[in-house]
Image (cartoon, rainbow, N blue to C red):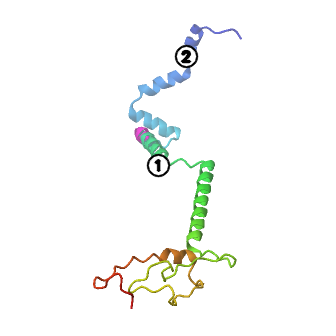
Amino acid sequence: MPKRGPDDILRDIEGSEAEEAADRALAMSRDERQTALRDAGFDLDALHAKADEWHARMQRAPIDEARRRLEADAARKSLRPAPSPRRRFAVLVAAALVAIAVVIALALVILPRPVSKETPVAQPSATAPPSATVGVGQPSATAPSSIPSSPSPSVPPSASARDAAPAPPRKKPRHESPASPPK
């Protein structure tokens, strides 16, 4: 097939039947075109409804595009990125370590410590030591004590040592002389 030049293509376009049909349709009036389409078997009401739908869609296209873009932007902004599995694992391990530390601290504070039978536990006594001077109103070193010397099993040693504080020294009454013997 020989190669066609631009002049050949132009001649074919000018002589085509499609162009002639378009020229004839444009030369008709509106009523003549509608009659020709009805005679050819087209439903003009359906064609007009379809044309109106396309026109409305073309008018809404920029609005619909803007709405879709805004919805996509809002969805993208509202979604927080999911934490990575490594970060989630690190947070879980840290929470477990904190929980273990709290349990151990509570166990050390709340649970009593076992008292060993081999080592005696020093209990604070309510009597003054033998080297202390005896004054009025103070028990003597040789007086029997009403406090038992054996440790109480219901009170842990740390609690009794914490609760017992040394009593403040009492002042001697003014009417007695320091050389007078106690009664």
On screen, 60 above or below 14? below
Element at label 1: helix
Looking at the rendered structure, the kind of residue marked 2 is Ile
Q: Is residue 43 left or right of residue 171?
A: right
Residue 73: say if magenta. no
Disc marking residue 78 = 1
**Residue closest to the far left:** 175
**Residue closest to the far right:** 1
Can the viewer see residue 48? no
Element at label 2: helix
- Examine the image and state in which quarter residue 98 appears: bottom right
Front-most of residues 177 and 74:
177
Q: How many marks?
A: 2
Q: Residue placed at 60% from the left, 66% from the top?
A: 104
Residue range in magenta is 58-63
- Examine the image and state in which quarter residue 166 appears: bottom left
The image position of residue 48, as x and y in percent, is 43, 42
Quadrant housing the N terminus: top right
- Examine the image and state in which quarter residue 97 appears: bottom right
Q: Pointers 2 and 1 in contact (CB under 8 A)?
A: no
Considering the whole magenta stretch, tell me its main secondary structure: helix
The residue where tag 2 is placed is 13
Disc marking residue 64 = none
User: Callout 2: few (<14), some (14-19), or many (20+) C-alpha neighbours within 10 Å?
Assistant: few
Looking at the rendered structure, the kind of residue marked 1 is Ser
Q: Is residue 126 left or right of residue 174?
A: right
For marks 2 and 1 on the same chain, the one whose residue lies earlier in the sequence: 2
